[in-house]
Image: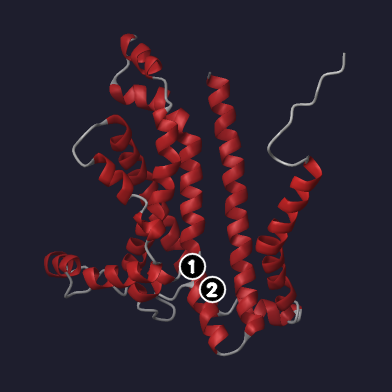
Amino acid sequence: MRRKKSRSVIPGFGISLGVTLTILSLIVLIPLCSLVVFSAKLSLSDFIRAVTGARVLSSYYVSISTALIASLINAVMGLILAWVLVRYDFPGKRLVDGIIELPFALPTAVAGISLTHLTTTNGWVGSFFYNVFGIKIAYTRIGITVALVFIGIPFVVRAVQPVLEKVDHECEEAAMLLGASSGTTFRKVIFPEILPAMISGFTLAFARSIGEYGSVVFIAGNTPYKTEIAPLMIMAQLQEYDYASATSIALVMLVIAFLILSVNAFLQSMAAKRVNGLA
């Protein structure tokens, strides 16, 4: 007897694939291809000159270095926040859990203005660090890093939290019954399970931080060769109506983001294989 095909609420493969490719092309592929088209208006020498100028290279360094530091901080603090939210019950837990997603909903310009007011030498936080330690936060790379920590930490928390919730407590209890300390249990049992999620959260926060503009432009000070970020260089070229140079810099940023996501996929695959090998 021939089996009856199970009906699905989703249309057939052909229609679904067509709709998917259409949406993907309109929203992602065509806008990204436009970067290549506009950049192609420059000759190879002009393109290299546009993306390797001293000021542009400095902006790359500022964006990448501050994004890397902020993402490393987020990897540690995000793990701690996820651990507290999963493993402990306390008054206001749901409120704290909701606040984690505030950087997603808050306009980046609002975040930038608020952080700037707090971290200037006259602000609540900035005045404390300046008067006690002599450290300036706003209008320095420290301020940029603070802003990037703010916008990047939800990526790590939301990546680690669901994985941490699914960690088998019986494995932890078995390790402790065999004499393992709390630190050893975390390193040998828990950490390998959440490592792929941490890598994912770290790289997503890193990729987002490199291209962040709204929350950084106010607190950075935008001093050339010191606190000028790559997205600001793109805006500067657009204000000068140099669209080809602006899209060339944007294309470089796109390539960097693509490489970061490719490395993320590779590291996640390696970590998952390692976990499966240990299982």
Q: Is residue 204 above or below residue 213?
A: above
Report which quarter residue 244 is drawn in.
bottom right
Quadrant where the image shows the N terminus = top right
Q: Is residue 45 above or below residue 177?
A: below
Q: Considering the numbered disc 1 on the image, is that residue within a helix, a strand or a loop?
A: helix
Give the residue displayed 59% in from the left and 61% down from the top: 256
Q: Is residue 98 above or below residue 42?
A: above
The amino acid marked with disc number 2 is: Leu
| Nearest to the observer: residue 188 or residue 163 | 163
The amino acid marked with disc number 1 is: Tyr
Instruction: Give the tally of numbered discs.
Output: 2
Residue extending furthest bottom? 240
Give the residue displayed 28% in from the left and 36% down from the top: 84
> Circle 1 is placed at which residue position?
61
Measured as percent of width and height from the top left, residue 215 is found at 38, 68
Measured as percent of width and height from the top left, residue 245 is found at 63, 81
Q: Residues within 10 Å of mark 1 (few under 14, many from 20)?
A: some
In the rendered image, is residue 55 in sight?
no
Left or right of 61, for residue 255? right
| Nearest to the observer: residue 44 or residue 38 | 38
Give the residue displayed 75% in from the left and 27% down from the top: 6
Measured as percent of width and height from the top left, residue 18 is found at 78, 51
Q: Considering the numbered disc 2 on the image, is that residue within a helix, a strand or a loop?
A: helix
Q: Are marks 2 and 1 in contact (CB under 8 Å)?
A: yes
- Mark 2 and mark 1: span between their CA atoms? 6 Å
Q: Residues within 10 Å of mark 2 (few under 14, many from 20)?
A: some
In the rendered image, is residue 221 in sight?
yes
Measured as percent of width and height from the top left, residue 220 is found at 36, 74
> Circle 2 is placed at which residue position?
57
What sort of colour scheme is used for the picture? secondary structure
Give the residue displayed 43% in from the left and 81% down from the top: 224
